[in-house]
Amino acid sequence: MSDSTQGMLAIDIGNTNIHFGFWQNNSWALSWRARTVPDKMPDEYAVLLRNFLSDADLGYRAISGVIIGSVVPALTPSFVELVENYIKQTPVVVTNQTPMGIKIAIDQPEQAGADRLVNAAAVVALYGAPAIVIDFGTATTFDVVSRDGAYSGGAIAPGIGIAHDALVSRTAKLHKIDLVPPPSPIGTNTIHAMQSGIFWGYVALVEGLVTRIKTAMNDTDIKVIATGGLAPLFNQHTTMIDTIAPELTLDGLRVIYELNRKR
C-alpha cells in the first residue's frame, strides 16, 4: 500500500462519545463518533472501527499510526489492546508526560484531562497564544494558554446537557426541552422559562467567565477558540467567541502525533 493511501488514526475518548478521525493527504478524510460504553470489549470496538473503515473502502492496513487521548481510564487499555491486536501497532497514548509542544504550568499536571491538554496544544500550534479554549462537551471547560505557550489551567463547569438533565430529574413538574433560546429572556410559560434559564444562563456563564479569565490573565489580544457540538449555536448569541474549531481535539492529537513521530 502506497503512502498516499495511508493515514493516521486519532481516537478521542470522551465521557459521552468516542471521536475517531482518519488523517490522510493533509485533511480529515474520515470523522465519526461512537457512544462511550466503558464495559464494551476491545473486540466490539474493533468491529465498529472496521465497519467505519470499510464503508470508506479502507481497512486496518490503511492506518500508518495511531494516537489516543482519553478521559475514560477504564477504556484506555481496551483501545491500546485493540490497536495492538488488530492494527498491529503501538499507539501514542497522551499523558501529561507526552511531548506536545506546550509547557504545563499547573499545580498537579497528572490531574489534567488529556482533552484539555490536547486542545491547548492544538491552539498553540494552529492559532497561537495567548488564548482561551472553550469546549462545549459533557462538561463545559475553559482552558487558558499564556503568551509564552504554557497551559495555565482554567475552569470546569457542568455541561449544559448535564444541567438540563439534573433540573428535570430533581423536579416533579419540569420536563425535557429543546436547548435553544426562547423568544424572550422573560419566559411567559414553563418551557420558555426553562429555556431562558438554561440557554441564556449558559451564555451568561460563558461571557462572565471569559471576562474574568481575561482580567486574570492581564494580557491583551487574547483569542477565544470554541469547540464541541454546541459551539456554533452559542457563537450565534455572544460576541465573546473569535473562532469555531469543530475538530480542535482531533487536530491537537494530530499535532502531538507528528511531534512524537519525529522524535
Image (spheres, grey):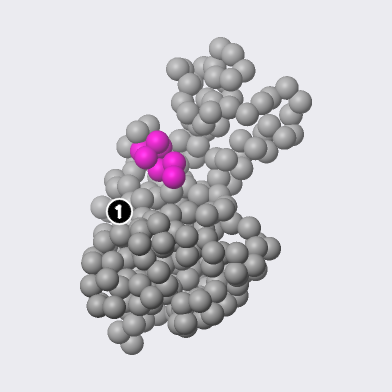
Q: Which of 54 and 218 is in front in this view?
A: 54
Write the residue at 55% across / 49% down.
138
Rendered view: 71 above or below 222: below
Rendered view: 80 above or below 190: below
Q: Which of 97 and 161 is in front in this view?
A: 161
Majority SS type along the magenta span: helix
* Residue bounds of the magenta highlight: 229-235
Instruction: Tell whether 149 sits left or right of 32.
Output: left
Write the residue at 46% across / 77% down.
87
Residue 254 rendering spot, x and y as whole percentages: 35, 69
Instruction: Tell me if residue 122 is in the magenta stretch.
Output: no
The part of the image, by quadrant, that contains residue 177 is: top right
Instruction: Tell whether 89 sits left or right of 42.
Output: left
Name the amino acid, label 1: Ile
Q: How crowded is mark 1: few (under 14 residues within 10 Å), some or many (20 or more)?
A: some
Q: Name the residue under label 1.
A: 222
* Residue 90 can be seen in this image: yes
Write the residue at 67% across / 38% down.
166
Q: Which of 16 and 44 is in front in this view?
A: 44
Rendered view: 115 above or below 138: below
Outermost top residue: 188
Image quadrant occupied by the C terminus: bottom left
The total number of labels drawn is 1
